[in-house]
Image (spheres, coloured by chain):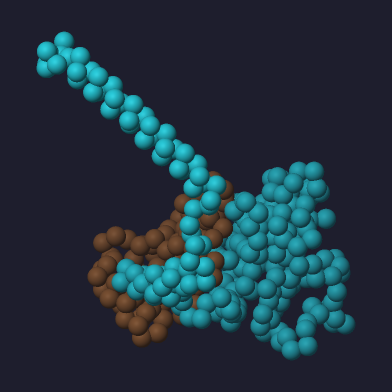
Amino acid sequence: MLFYSYFKTLVGKEVTVELKNDLAITGTLHSVDQYLNIKLNSIRVVNEQKYPHMLSVRNCFVRGSVVRYVQLPPGSVDVELLHDATRREARGG
Amino acid sequence: MLDAESIGLLPALERDAQGGPLLDEDEALLQQFERVQLVIGAAADQGEGTLFITEGRVIWLSASQQDLGYSCDFPTIAMHAVATDAESSQRPCLYLQLDNGCDDGGAFGLGGGGSASSGNSASGSEDSEAEADELLPELRLIPAEESQLEALFQAFCEGAERNPDTSDEEEGEGAGFFYNQDEALAGAAQGMALGGGGDVEELLGEDPSRFEDDEEEEEEQKEEEQLQQEQAAAVEVQQQQAGSNASGHPNGC
């Protein structure tokens, strides 16, 4: 549940979600669930030329299993905290 | 005929007696949206139809053509969104992208899925309806009533949540990943202990001369050594001769 808990702390922040099919979407993190399904608001597509039909998309829901990366705003990441949390998670299971 | 299968859409050709979708034994119909237009890819308009939401998948059946329909399971839907463009003439719709999991070098599963392998090659492709060379795995569901959009969006959210991936690969979140350097090194040390220094002795135990040089090589080596010795001796002799000749001129000239 580590990443679910972690992403919940980023609700309201701007993130870029990169899907396994190479689509990249930047938006405000609206919500995340235990499967890491992600809802983004006020989105803009990084490679918008390829997907002209997405120009008018404002809010979207991304299936957790198709996410490759979630790019985080640098200022919002407490690396030490995350480091400790993952270490604890690895030990505790 | 549109090569919809290449992007993860299965044809739904049969209907039940009431004109609804043919469901599996345990499959329950949860919701139904009337008068929804389906557009596949860039502009392959399928016309108006009815959208059926079941526990595990979505089925769209054409209102006018009895043998036209498609179904798609929720795990294939990579993302969905409400698209409301007030500026362009595009009607408000639910935009979806599919990902059927196969990757054939391209970004989407073009040409790689199942028997429909013609999607990616120009020679095999027969979709004259598609404007682009590739059929991008995009769908648009355009309801006749804009007010249905929110409910549609929600239905797809819930469908995705109902159908998470159940992969056997991972025992848990991030299983198999090292979380920090210490763990990674600990793992490596463990590997060393199991198959490290003790091994050589074990291997030698059976055959002490196992790692000795070949006999042929030994002979060659001996010959070389001999040659070197002779050369060294020859050099020594020269030096002695040179030394005796140049006895009067220690610094040489």
Residue B161: horizontal and vertical position, in percent?
55, 79
User: Can you see residue B39?
Assistant: no
Q: Position of residue B82 (x, y in %)?
A: 55, 65
Q: Is residue B215 left or right of residue B235?
A: right
Chain B takes which shade in the image? cyan
Q: What's the residue at 47%, 39% (across, down)?
A: B223
Q: Is residue B229 visible?
A: yes
- Chain the render paints brown: A
The residue drawn where x is 52% and y is 77% is B170
Q: Is residue B15 above or below residue A71?
A: below
Report the front residue among A75 and A81.
A81
Q: Quadrant of the N terminus of chain B?
A: bottom right
Coordinates of residue B222 in the picture (x, y in percent): 45, 43
- Along the line of sight, the residue nearer the viewer: A5 or B129: A5
Farthest residue to the top: give it: B253
Foreground: B123 or B226?
Answer: B226
**Quick one: A15 or B112, which is closer to the camera?**
B112
Q: Quadrant of residue B111?
A: bottom right
> Which residue is rendered at x = 70% and y = 57% of the image?
B112
- In the image, residue B4 sits, relative to residue B170, either above or below, namely above
